[in-house]
Amino acid sequence: MSVELTMLTYSVGLLFVLVFLQALAGIRAQGAVPLANSRDDLPPPSGFHARMKRVVDNHREGLTMFAPLVLVAAVAGVSSEITVLGAQLFFYSRVAHAVLYIFGVPMVRPLAWTVGLAGTVMVFAALVGLA
């Protein structure tokens, strides 16, 4: 498997971990029984539960840009130092972003997000012939 596909696989694995942590935070905040029901009358998440929801949503949004590009690159047989570095930047910055988000570290978190976006742009640029 290529480095790019490996980074995509690891990124999905990170999403699994984040969703699991979000579920645990939800159970802790709302209780298992209310979450197992329709959830129609639940109050909006707050505190750590809300932060976990935001980090999951943010990672999912990043994956919606990154994943198709990596899959297109794999199908098209496009792999270069740029796509490899872009994929690695995406994954490792997303891990850093998630950790910073979970622990509520301000100011630095957007830098990690920016590095992940730059990695995605690098893969895109290689696909369209700009890199």
Image: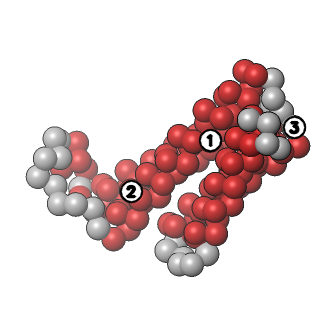
Q: Is residue 10 left or right of residue 33?
A: right
Q: Residues within 10 Å of mark 2 (few under 14, many from 20)?
A: some
Contact between marks 3 and 2 (CB within 8 A): the answer is no
> Residue flagged by tag 2: what amino acid is it?
Lys
Which residue is found at the position 29% from the left and 67% from the top?
A: 46
In the image, which is nearer the foreground, mark 2 or mark 1? 1
> Residue flagged by tag 1: what amino acid is it?
Phe
In the image, which is nearer the foreground, mark 3 or mark 2? 3
Residue 88 rendering spot, x and y as whole percentages: 76, 49
Residue 68 rendering spot, x and y as whole percentages: 60, 32
Residue labelled with disc 3: 80
Which residue is found at the position 41% from the left and 59% from the top?
A: 54
Q: Indicate which disc, 3 or 1, sits on the residue closer to the N terminus.
A: 1
Compare residues 78 and 51 and report the one nearer the observer.
Answer: 78
Q: Is residue 49 above or below residue 75?
A: below
Which residue is found at the position 67% from the left and 28% from the top?
A: 71
Residue labelled with disc 2: 53
The mark found on residue 66 in the picture is 1
Quadrant hosting residue 12: top right
Quadrant location, the C terminus: top right
Q: Residues within 10 Å of mark 1 (few under 14, many from 20)?
A: many
Tell me the CA gap for discs 2 and 1. Answer: 20 Å
